[in-house]
Amino acid sequence: MADSSRTHDWKRIEKEIQCPNYQQILQELSRKHVAMRPFNTWMDVVDFMRKGGSEDPSKDGILRIIFQAHCVDQNHHWRTVLLAIFWPALVSIHWQKRHWDSDLDERWQNIVWTFLRVISRLDPQRRRERFVQKVFNDTVHYLHADYRRQWIKSEPETPMDLDDLSDLQGEEDVDVEAIERRLSEEKEIQRLRFHQNASRLSEEDLLLLIGTRVYGQSMSAYAKSAGLNYQTAKKRRQRAELAIRKFEEDHPAS
């Protein structure tokens, strides 16, 4: 079921990045950057990024251009393009960290959610190389931090295994300061309250998203504390996130 769902999601993303709006922003990048001119479509870019090693300097160049464009306008199109580029890496994390969460669908949603947080905060002015490693390592790191908060609530201590430590080796600038995490949480809560004030989310939806997405509570734990059926809570969160995404895609300036 989960594999089928991911296949469906990938087909949707593959179709989306071939739409005229995406072709237009690729043409705009090609006019500004010589490195983008060999690519006629975004799938050409995706295919290029998937070939060879991740440390290829030309791949860093492509990612730097995309991240710079994302920093300028925060257009959701860039996040979809980056999701397509990093899709195999996310599938790899989903397989490697299967012992973190036995719920395949929940684990996949958490990985994608974490990935989107990571790419939204990456500043290409502060980093000039190794973008692939940075995004992969940060996604694993923050995903582990979210799960660790869940584990601490349910068990006295859950140590990080050696495989988890090896994922983070060589990453010298992962910032895990509590103050930065708190500011990030407050920013996300403000974003969710914006949608709740506009009646796109109910109060129940807001609390569900804050509990499970901002503070990292597991869906099963939240559903139990809120007196909800697990599947009901999961479907409610999916509907709420779909409403947010649809609005933000239609109104990127917001």
Image (tube, helix red, strand yellow):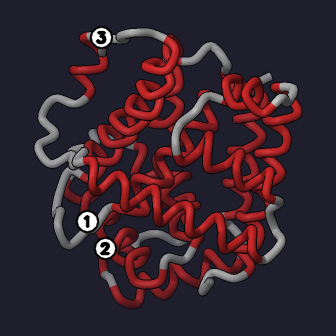
> According to the image, label 3 marks what residue?
161
Q: Is 166 above or below relative to 36? A: above
Residue 58, located in which quarter of the rendered image?
bottom left
Look at the numbered discs 1 and 2 and tell me whether their residues touch, using CB distance below 8 Å.
yes
Instruction: Measure the alpha-carbon separation of dots 3 and 1.
Output: 34 Å
Residue 35's disc is 2
Which residue is found at the position 87% from the left and 26% from the top? 229
Amino acid under disc 2:
Ala
State the SS at label 3: loop
> According to the image, label 1 marks what residue?
61
Q: Is 85 above or below relative to 217? A: below
Which residue is found at the position 58% from the left and 33% from the top? 217
Q: Residues within 10 Å of mark 1 (few under 14, many from 20)?
A: some
Mark 1 vs 2, N-terminal side: 2
Front of the two marks 1 and 2: 1
Front of the two marks 3 and 1: 3
Residue 156 location, x and y as percent?
39, 9
Amino acid under disc 3:
Asp
